[in-house]
Amino acid sequence: MTAYGKPLPRITPDNRPFWDAARCHRLALQRCADCARFRYPPAPVCPACLSDRAEWAAVSGQGAVSTFVVFHQRYFPSFAADIPYNVVQVELDEGPRLTANLIDVPNAEISIGMRVEVIFDDVTSEISLPRFRRAAT
Ligand code: ZN
């Protein structure tokens, strides 16, 4: 999604490795060092085992659409001008689900199970969600 005039997500000790990796065109997610479950968004404590030990793991950026919604300005008049746009949940091959924006695919062609891959745009203040496109087959 392109949100004009929106400030950069706040960089904190919790999510700095995510943005550092994104600037190097890699996708990294926080993972519990004890039970190995991914924590997304990053959290100080694992919601599954309550461990406070975490590590950052590289993930492929490949996955499939698990749910999606298309926003129309008629119903959300206060939203940005670049709508209709979509918000998809992408289930990565490694397991975690990311809320993302699917670009270069007409909204009518989005379907559950569609294979997608992350796009490593330069990190700017206008990008507020990870962006994905249809995976090359
Ligand atoms: Zn855990």
Image (tube, helix red, strand yellow):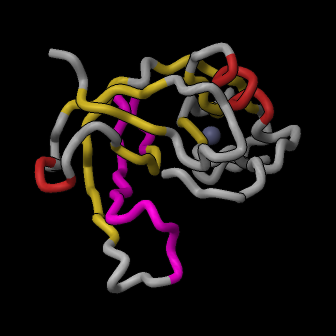
Q: Which residue occupies the extreme front position in the image? A: 81
Compared across the picture, whether 130 is left or right of 104 comes to: right
**Residue appearing at x 45%, y 84% in the figure:** 77
Question: Which residue is the extreme one toward the right?
Answer: 13
Q: Quadrant of residue 28?
A: top right
Residue placed most toward the observer, 103 or 136: 103
Q: In the image, which residues are magenta? A: 78-97
Residue at image position (22%, 41%) is 105
Asked if the stretch drawn in magenta spans residue 111, the answer is: no
x and y percentages locating residue 123 in the rendered image = 67, 31
User: How many numbered discs, if any?
Assistant: 0
Q: Quadrant of ligand 1?
A: top right
Q: Is residue 48 above or below residue 81?
A: above
Instruction: Name the foreground residue: 6 vs 55.
Output: 6
* x then y, percent, for residue 131: 45, 38
Figure quadrant of the C terminus? top left
Between residues 114 and 47, which one lies in front from this camera angle? 114
Q: Where, by quadrant of the figure, is residue 85 drawn?
A: bottom left
Question: Is 21 situated above or below 128?
Answer: above
- Left or right: residue 58 versus residue 34 is left
Viewer-nearest residue: 103 or 26: 103
Q: Position of residue 64 (x, y in %)?
A: 25, 36
Could you tell me residue 122's position as x and y percent?
62, 25
Residue at 13% from the left image edge and 55% from the top image edge:
108
**Side (left or right) of 18 relative to 133:** right
